[in-house]
Amino acid sequence: MANDQCSKESNCAKTSEEPYLLDSSTFLSEEMNNVGEFRFNSNRHANSSLRFSNNDCTVEWIEASQAIWIPIETKAKLHSGKWSLEFDVEWMGTHQIGVGFLLDWNIGPDWGFFGYLGSSRSAWSYDPSTGDIVTNTESVHGNLPKFTGNSGVIGLELDLPKNEIGKFTFIVDGVRTPTKQLPKSGAVAIPAVCLLSRGQKVTIRNLIRLNQDKTTLLVQTE
């Protein structure tokens, strides 16, 4: 298929436009000042197997489900600057888990045909159980740091300039991994997680914007 996004037939039917990645260099002033909310989008998971707490900054898979994995995106849409945030994986268990981000399209983010984080070509996931960065269903860098137990912290730095190609870096329990490049300039990033086992629990915290040598703490959760 020529465009990954057209696997979402319902979304493609809603617009006559060819799907395209959002470009922050085209944003109007209102859009430039809008980066959404740094919390999970619990509205999309009403009556699900998940429990949201901590002002929707913590998500936990608590109920039995037929789902193999559950993808959860945040309401944040980060762009036009340098950002850092943390995923506190409070419990991973013995299964895989994914934390990372998706790029935003004009019809919404693309989770890919399989529906997990890192399944599409516009999403990147770090799996601390295997030490891999995954995109488009494939590991693009392996043999990276793993958690030594059932928990740990993964930092994410996003460099998202309006008129230049962006890049990102995962930081696993304080160890920096190789920086990777995004496919285009003006990218808009949506932090997200993908739980793959009942009992897994993740908290997002410490979103910081770094611009022109100034640091502004937007949200901090303990």
Image: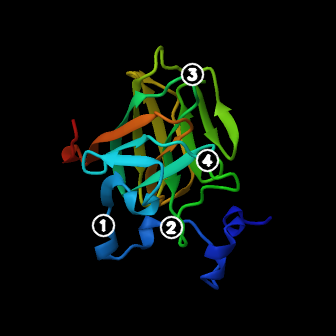
Separation of disc 3 and disc 1 at Cα?
34 Å
Front position among marks 2 and 3: 3
**Structural distance between the alpha carbons of marks 4 and 1:** 33 Å
Q: Residue furthest right?
A: 1
Label at residue 144: 3
Name the side, left or right, on which 114 lies relative to 218.
right
Say whether marks 3 and 1 touch (CB < 8 Å).
no
Who comes first in sequence, dot 3 or dot 1?
1
Q: Secondary structure at mark 2?
A: loop
Q: Nearer the viewer, mark 4 or mark 1?
A: 4
Give whichever of discs 2 and 1 has the lower sequence position: 2
Which residue does the numbered mark 4 point to in the structure image? 67
Position in image of residue 51 (x %, y %): 38, 47
Q: Is residue 35 above or below residue 55?
A: below
> Which badge, 4 or 2, is on the more N-terminal residue?
2
Q: Amino acid at mark 2?
A: Leu
- Residue at coordinates 52% horizontally, 53% vertically from top-left? 102
Residue at 52% of width from left, 56% of height from top?
103
Q: Which residue is mark 1?
A: 34
Which three-letter amino acid code belongs to the residue tagged 1?
A: Asn
Mark yes or no: residue 113 visible: yes
- Please give the residue where the numbered disc 2 appears in the rendered image: 22
At a point 60% along the width and 83% down the height, the residue shown is: 15
- Going by the picture, which residue comes out furthest to the front? 64
Amino acid carrying label 4: it is Ala
Real-space Cα separation, disc 4 to disc 2, in angstroms: 30 Å
CB-based contact (under 8 Å), mark 4 and mark 2: no
Q: Are marks 2 and 3 in contact (CB under 8 Å)?
A: no
